[in-house]
Amino acid sequence: MQPKVYFVGAGPGEVDLITVKGRRLVELADVLIYVGSLLHPGHLAFFKAGAERHDSKEMTHEQIVEVMVRSVRSGKSVVRLSSGDPSLFGALAEQLESLEAQDIPYEIIPGVSSAFAAAAAIATELTIPEVAQTVIFSRFQGRTPMPPKEELSALAEHGATMVLFLSTQYIKEVVRELRSGYPPDTPVAVVQKASWPQEERVIRGTLSDIAEKVKTARIVWTALVLVGPVVDRRHWAAGRHSKLYDKSFSHGYRDKEDPSS
């Protein structure tokens, strides 16, 4: 294992949902930096004996980078283990910028996003033909301002499937903004700790009642909000099938069936 920083997506929660490559790197790393408040503790059992461990929930960006730089320059391999996939709300860009400024090599290993684990938890496809073919990953503004034209009220105008990270604590404000584009009966699901054994929770409702349901369930953190007709099968007609496997549809690997045969 080369002396560099490996950004590894640990997956959404269940320990086996990390990639094979990610698990191998975790087992071999000399130094591991992980988000203890978000990572399933089962991952720690795969750290090798004697590996240096740092829980980044108690560290600043500068402290994290200092550990990375010091370790790589001393010939050690570093795994930065993040929940889900590093490229989605993982503070990845700022870490890469700091490493590049100091000529520290790195590699990014993708992981399974909690967005997809949440879709699995409610047994839906995020892109149903003729219902929704676009998925928006976003969040409520909170303490970090949103770029122009990316407020939820603006994104809601598209009527697409929406998956919101870091937003459950603002559920009332989220609903208010989404109502500017979605009708009040739009299905919503809030999935807390998607894929975590014994800890996953799913709250279903509509924009009219989801805020009260989430409040009653006392869900604040580590949850995703999924919005759109795909969330509830009753809101899209049966028979909305992909053309890919339709017997009347031909493509480069299959001719369509002859109806006269």
Image (cartoon, rainbow, N blue to C red):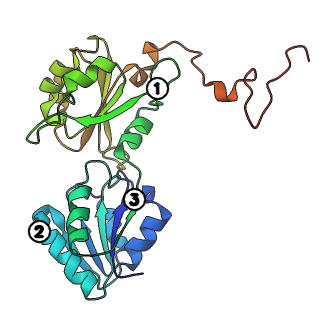
Q: Residues within 10 Å of mark 2 (few under 14, many from 20)?
A: few
The percent coordinates of residue 209 (x first, y second) are: 22, 17
Quadrant of the snapshot with the C terminus: top right
The percent coordinates of residue 144 (x first, y second) are: 11, 42
Q: CA distance from mark 2 to mark 1?
A: 40 Å
Q: CA distance from mark 1 to mark 3?
A: 30 Å
Marks 1 and 2: in contact by CB < 8 Å?
A: no
* Identity of the residue drawn at 26% across and 11% down: 184
The percent coordinates of residue 175 (x first, y second) are: 19, 21
Residue mark closest to the camera, 2 vs 3: 2
Q: Is residue 78 left or right of residue 59?
A: right
Q: Is residue 95 visible?
A: yes
**Dot 2 lies on which element?**
helix
Quadrant of the snapshot with the N terminus: bottom left
Q: Is residue 128 left or right of residue 212?
A: right
Amino acid type of the residue tagged 1 in the rendering = Gln
**Above or below 137: residue 49:** below
Mark sitting earlier along the chain (1/3): 3
**Residue found farthest to the bottom:** 74
* Identity of the residue drawn at 50% across and 24% down: 128
Mark sitting earlier along the chain (2/1): 2
Residue mark closest to the camera, 1 vs 3: 1
**Above or below 181: residue 200:** below
Number of the label disc, if any, that sits on residue 15: 3
Where, by quadrant of the figure, is residue 177 drawn? top left
**Dot 1 lies on which element?**
loop
* Identity of the residue drawn at 27% across and 21% down: 156
Q: Which residue is mark 1?
A: 133
Q: Which residue is mark 2?
A: 62
The percent coordinates of residue 30 (x first, y second) are: 32, 82
